[in-house]
Image (cartoon, rainbow, N blue to C red):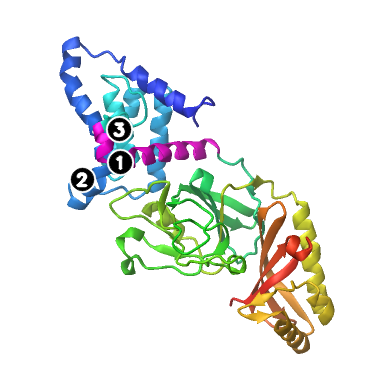
Amino acid sequence: MLPDLCWQRCLLAALAVVCLIVFSSPAQAKQKKQKKRAVATVALASAAAAPTLVRAGKTKAPAPNGLQAEARLIQIYQLIGQSKTREALKLADKLVLDHPNFALAQLVHGDLLAAQTQPVRALGDVPEATVRAAPGVLTDLREESLLRIRALREKPAAGMLPSNFVRLSARNKHAIAVDASRARLYLFENTAQGLRLVADYYASVGKMGIEKNVEGDLKTPLGIYFVTNTLDPNSLKDLYGAGALPINYPNPYDIRRGKTGSGIWLHGVPQAQFARAPKATDGCVAVSNPDLQDILKRVEIRTTPVVILPKLEWVNPAQTNADTAAFDRAFSSWRSAKAAGGLDAAMVHYSPDFDSYGKKLAEWRGVISSEIAKKRSSELKDVSVLHWAESPSSATMVITFSEVPTGAVSGPTKRQYWLRSAATSNQWKIFFEGIIG
């Protein structure tokens, strides 16, 4: 990890020190100056042109491990922060050779070369003419660098988990959480001891940011979703890279609030790129192709939750907040009422504006009555609970479970959405319920 002082100051100070490197003689320094300055001048252009070089087959194909590439870049930053710039340059030489399409690495490499003969004032210290030739690229790369460093300096403490994962069943083998403020995707494995963070990746979101509302607004939605499918990269445009994982946007809560749009995926990047700018998609979440391939090995259709938030709240999983405790009581009451065959007692837990694929509350009362009549005794298995608070005054719980009649081996898998807000008199009420499998 970098020292506690601001990483930008550390990086710039270290790069400034590099200009004081003494060559064997002034003449040698003068001879090298022109070459190093030229490399620095085109640092930004090289970063932008890296994809072209890959397509043309003029450079070595990228190494397969994206996580390793990011770790190597951070190591370079650490060496710069320690004023070990010669060592940093050696690592940067190798990194851009292994990953010629890693634009940020190309930029840092150019700065390290330039810093041997002149002061470097900022990350990507190139002439204005070069910046104008690739408008926006330098700004995006600087933001990417800051976000990568910030996310890795502010890693969650061991054992802490996003507050959204209240309870996951054994069927939820993995879970995903996206923190838009850090441009980071976190991947968890559900073990016998509970959720365990296994990896985290740099991720891009919508060009216009987050909180999607309407079709075409170029924003990434916020909420609780599930992977619904896996798409073969051979059937996709190169834009999506190594593949795609569609999620169920708009979910029932999105529909309730009138949100529109579709086709929100977790996907890769064009083969000629290593990563996209922090805000570069049409509303999807994009990670590098090596990172996506790692994710594809783990996720499962319909059972892998994907939480997307402006900022994740990391908590001790042993702690239970008041919202969760109140919900547990409401859920237990609904479950007991239905098991006891009490139709009226069960229906108390449904919101007046309940909707299940077009079925309103009156029709749903008939569905529940029929279920109670057919099987008075059943057991809920594989219960998972996910929590999302849109605001202090409004929260949702997404519940998935199998309802298995007593004596049976299996039963339908259902999903419920519960809401606590002013619309429900601040009580937990079911506004959606449906069979998903």
Q: Main secondary structure of the magenta part?
A: helix
Between the residue at mark 3 and the residue at mark 1, the CA separation in whole angstroms equals 20 Å
Judge whether residue 206 can be spotted in this image: yes
Q: Residue 45: which quarter of the image?
A: top left
What's the residue type where badge 3 is placed? His
What's the residue type where badge 1 is placed? Pro
Q: Residue 257: which quarter of the image?
A: bottom right
Residue interval drawn in magenta: 129-154
* Contact check, label 2 and label 3, Cβ < 8 Å: no
Q: Residues within 10 Å of mark 2 (few under 14, many from 20)?
A: some
Q: Which residue is mark 2?
A: 59
What's the residue type where badge 2 is placed? Thr
- Residue 141 colored in magenta in the image: yes
Label 2, secondary structure: give it.
loop
Q: Please give the label number shown on residue 109.
A: 3
161 and 44: which one is in front?
44
Q: Is residue 345 left or right of residue 208?
A: right
Q: Is residue 188 left or right of residue 343?
A: left
Q: Earlier in the sequence, mark 2 or mark 3?
A: 2
Q: Nearer the viewer, mark 3 or mark 1?
A: 1
Between the residue at mark 2 and the residue at mark 3, the CA separation in whole angstroms equals 16 Å
Q: Which residue is mark 1?
A: 135
